[in-house]
Amino acid sequence: MTNPLLAEWTGPFGLPPFDAIEDADFGPALEAALAEDLAEVAGVADAAEPPTFANTIEGLIRCGATLDRVTGVFFNLAGSDSTPAREALMREYSPKLAAHAAAIYGNRPLFDRIRSLWERRETLGLNDEQARVLMLVHRNFIRAGAALEGDDAARMTAIKQRLAVLGTSFTQNLLADERDWSMPLSEADLEGLPGFVVAAARAAGEERGAAGPVLTLSRSLIVPFLQFSPRRDLRERAYKAWVARGAGGGATDNREIAAEILGLRQERAALLGYADFASYKLETEMAGTPAKVRALLSAVWAPARAQAEADAQLLEERMHADGVNAALAPWDWRYYAGKRRKAEHDLDDAALKPYLQLDRMIEAAFDCANRLFGLEFRALDLPLYHPDARAWEVTRGGAHVAVFIGDYFARGSKRSGAWCSAMRMQGKFPKVQHPVVVNVCNFAKGTPALLSYDDARTLFHEFGHALHQMLSDVTYDMVAGTSVARDFVELPSQLFEHWLEVPEVLRRFATHVETGDAMPQEMLDKVLKAANFDQGFQTVEYVASALVDLAFHEGAAPAVPMAKQAEVLAALEMPAAIGMRHATPHFAHVFAGDGYSSGYYSYMWSEVMDADAFAAFEDAGGAFDPEMARKLEKHILSAGGSQEAEALYLAFRGRMPGVEALLKGRGLAS
């Protein structure tokens, strides 16, 4: 029978035939796609005709269509619905795919053709997007080591293969620790927990086949448990398990893996002539240099730490008033912060959550996209890769724009966190293709599912990434959508979060799960007033992680990353009651791949812009100002990576912002 991954996909919107794909299909499909891609690339590299943009750059872009289709499905499933077979395939094919990419970048005849075009670029008559694509292709080859020769070239290939193996191991170890740990909860252990936490614990127990409710390491369950459980002993046990992911010893321990990754990255940078990996990685980002990253983080650290220390004193006083005569610990912070928030803002998450139904928050995100950009969403009844996943056709003026897939619930087969990916990117060459965009979250299941305010913000955040993909309007898919500098990619996502806080959005869509009544104005006012509550804590745990990431990659790679982490935190005088948002053994942003390595700061770099960008809407006439929405789509969302990030932002806003907007937005400056 024909392998469904290799056959033409003739179903609606050219979606993969998920109901026909089996795990056994991936290996043969990947082998066939890899061989086909190499043959196609060889055809471009060995062409007898002199190199032109059409026969070399566009020729290269034409290559690998089958491989893109197969990996688009495989990597989405491997992250969102892992199986033992898929994990084995990841371990087998991660180094193969790295070697495949190295073979292409190491193809000297191909690189010679690209270099020839680069040297003659001013005479080729290219339009702006073509010139950008030529620059990116040439730069990608240089940064991949295409100019290396002999032993250096061979070593670069070996490093990339080993990094692929290590990144896969890091991810799978973390998934295993998250999947395998649970804490049974007796009826007495449930006392004091709001109904939505109890329901989520019971659902987690059912999903795991347990006899009763359990606590898992899913953020959507453990964070509210830490916030609401009056049992300090249980909070301590849960918190310690949460932060010990990847550091429990044995087969799933990630500490030695992290050390080897850092050493290989340093060696890779040195082969390419860079002082360290941070200098290599940041060269193509908006920040440009480690010094500029450190300057931003340092400017934020001092006021954030001061606020956190002041808050810690108040929380410890509350704890002592409860009769707990101990120092405030990390497993105490959320519990007493919740009590303080209720006292100071009269806002209780248990009372708020019934107004934040998942389906209504999805509707809210869709409605904002409609009012801003004219997008419409129609639910689709199609076979997808998991029963929890849902799909919508996205249209504008009756014309098809994209397919959007939402996969919102936590499960043991899904890695932690939330992300946006594309099974198919937008493009017009060699033929028009519309994107297939996926948002993956880890919300607790319920009937109906209820979100925390942070969950709702996460939904809007990931949908902002999805809009960047869906509204892309470029010719070449290599610059489509989120194919931008890492410290620019979070701008659309973080900017879209602001629409959740628009009062008219909450008034319309934050309706009570039982009565259907809109959120009372008094509660709405409290929600918005408390938006910056506990920002000292949130900023400190984030900036500490970003500074540790930078320290890992700036200068010589540390032989013992945990010792380096401790050194950085000591130098920062990290508040004792706050932990890093992502400690080294479970810092997947940095160690699961190169994506955010030396780049975890990028959320804050983008936040400098998103605060300023939303202010542009408010200054112009409100959150739904049509002219600002048009400018946002034209200069940022539709442009992808077709220009430098700074040029895109300047075209949208007319100037670059300073850090003041960020500090004010977080309530850390007046």
Image: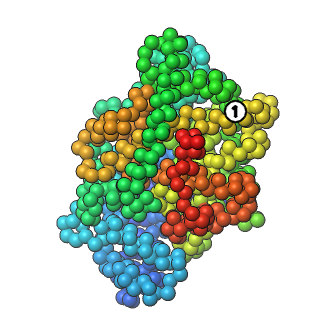
What's under tag 1, amino acid-wise? Lys
Residue 486 appears in view: yes
**Residue 451, located in which quarter of the rendered image?**
top right
Q: Name the residue located 51 percent from the left edge and 18 percent from the top edge.
A: 317
x, y percent for residue 110: 35, 77
In this view, 377 is above or below 316: below
Q: Residue furthest top?
A: 323
Secondary element under disc 1, as helix, strand or loop, is helix
Residue indicated by mark 1: 526
- Residue at figure coordinates x 68%, y 38% from the top left: 528
Q: On the rendered image, what quadrant is the C terminus found in? A: top right
Residue 103 x/y as whole percent: 32, 68
Give the percent coordinates (x, y) of residue 498: 64, 48
Residue 242 visible in image? no
In this view, 530 is above or below 441: above
Residue at 29% in and 37% down:
567
Residue 516 location, quadrant: top right
374 sits left or right of 178 in the view: right
Total residue callouts: 1
* Nearer to us in this view, 417 or 139: 139
Q: Tell me if mark 1 has few (under 14), some (14-19) or many (20+) residues whose alpha carbon lies within 10 angstroms of its own.
A: some
Between residues 560 and 260, which one lies in front from this camera angle?
560
In the rendered image, residue 647, in percent from the top left (x then y), is placed at: 53, 68
User: What sort of colour scheme is used for the picture?
Assistant: rainbow
